[in-house]
């Protein structure tokens, strides 16, 4: 009976903390790859951020790559997996590439639709107020060091009314 194909072993949600020495070695290996990847696909996260035309005439803002990317465990995990997948595709290791998600077409789709969107989501969180300031979504903003220095949007000068089915959201008069 043939054995089932197995992909590379990954630790997506470690149940125990990774020793600091191992985490540092992993980051040292990942960082140069991320720098090249970040530059090669920079249109997905332009340096100064920009508004871009989306599907069917919708516009959306594109944020720059977050300087604090290495502090977001989910993004680091995504980038580590993407690096392994990239290496498998580049080396022609079809078995590993298939286990990771497929060949080049699936890889580039993943870069644009999954990794790119994850970077945008984190950048949007950490660029609130117009500055690149790391925020943990697991900790309330006012409990994070340095939050006082942020330029947060001012609350509206007039209270908002509840949405009306006929009129939509509007201000009190």
Image (cartoon, rainbow, N blue to C red):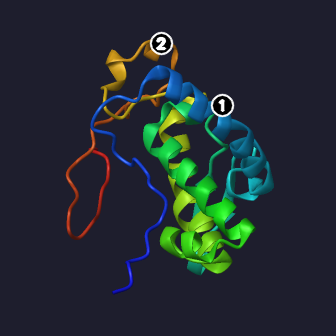
Where in the figure is residue 150, as x and y percent of width and height? 51, 20
Quarter of image, res 158:
top left
Other residues around mark 2 within 10 Å, as few (<14) / some (14–19) / many (≥20): few
Residue 125 versus residue 74: which sits nearer the camera?
Answer: 74
Is disc 1 placed on a helix, strand or loop? helix
Vertical arrangement, residue 162 with respect to residue 99, above or below: above
- Give percent across and percent down for residue 164: 20, 62
Which of 11 and 172 lies nearest the eye of the viewer? 11
Rendered-image quadrant of the C terminus: top left
* Residue on which disc 2 sits: 146
Is residue 48 shown to the viewer in this render? no
Q: Find residue 142 and name its label.
A: none
Q: Which mark is in front, 1 or 2?
A: 1
81 w.r.t. 74: above or below: below
- Residue at x 49%, y 71% (from the top left corner): 99
Q: Determine whether the residue tagged by mark 2 lies in a helix, strand or loop.
A: loop
Q: CA distance from mark 1 to mark 2?
A: 27 Å
Q: Report the residue at 49% width, 59% height from top.
A: 8
* Mark 1 crowdedness (10 Å alpha carbons): few <14, some 14-19, many ≥20: few
Name the image quarter holding the N terminus.
Answer: bottom left
Q: Quadrant of residue 115?
A: bottom right
- Identify the mark nearer the N-term, 1 or 2: 1
Which of the labelled discs sits on residue 28, or is there none? Answer: 1
Q: Is residue 14 above or below residue 133?
A: below
Answer left or right for 120 relative to 92: left
Quick one: which residue is furthest to the bottom in this view? 1
Q: Residue at x 78, y 47 (%)?
A: 36
Q: Is residue 137 left or right of residue 123?
A: left
Residue 160 locus on image (x, y percent): 27, 43
């Amino acid at each position: 009976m043939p054995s089932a194909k197995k992909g590379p072993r990954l630790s997506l949600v470690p149940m125990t903390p990774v020793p600091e020495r191992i985490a540092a070695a992993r980051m040292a290996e990942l960082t140069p790859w991320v720098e090249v990847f970040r530059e090669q696909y920079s249109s997905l996260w332009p340096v100064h951020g920009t508004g871009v035309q989306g599907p069917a005439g919708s516009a959306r803002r594109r944020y720059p790559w977050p300087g604090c990317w290495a502090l977001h465990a989910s993004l680091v995990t995504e980038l580590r997996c993407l690096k392994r997948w990239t290496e498998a595709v580049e080396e022609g290791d079809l078995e590993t590439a298939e286990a990771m998600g497929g060949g080049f077409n699936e890889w580039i789709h993943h870069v644009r639709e999954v990794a790119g969107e994850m970077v945008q989501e984190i950048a949007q969180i950490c660029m609130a107020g117009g500055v690149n300031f790391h925020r943990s979504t697991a900790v309330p903003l006012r409990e994070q060091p340095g939050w006082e220095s942020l330029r947060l949007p001012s609350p509206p000068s007039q209270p908002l009314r509840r949405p009306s089915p006929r009129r939509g959201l509007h201000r009190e008069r």
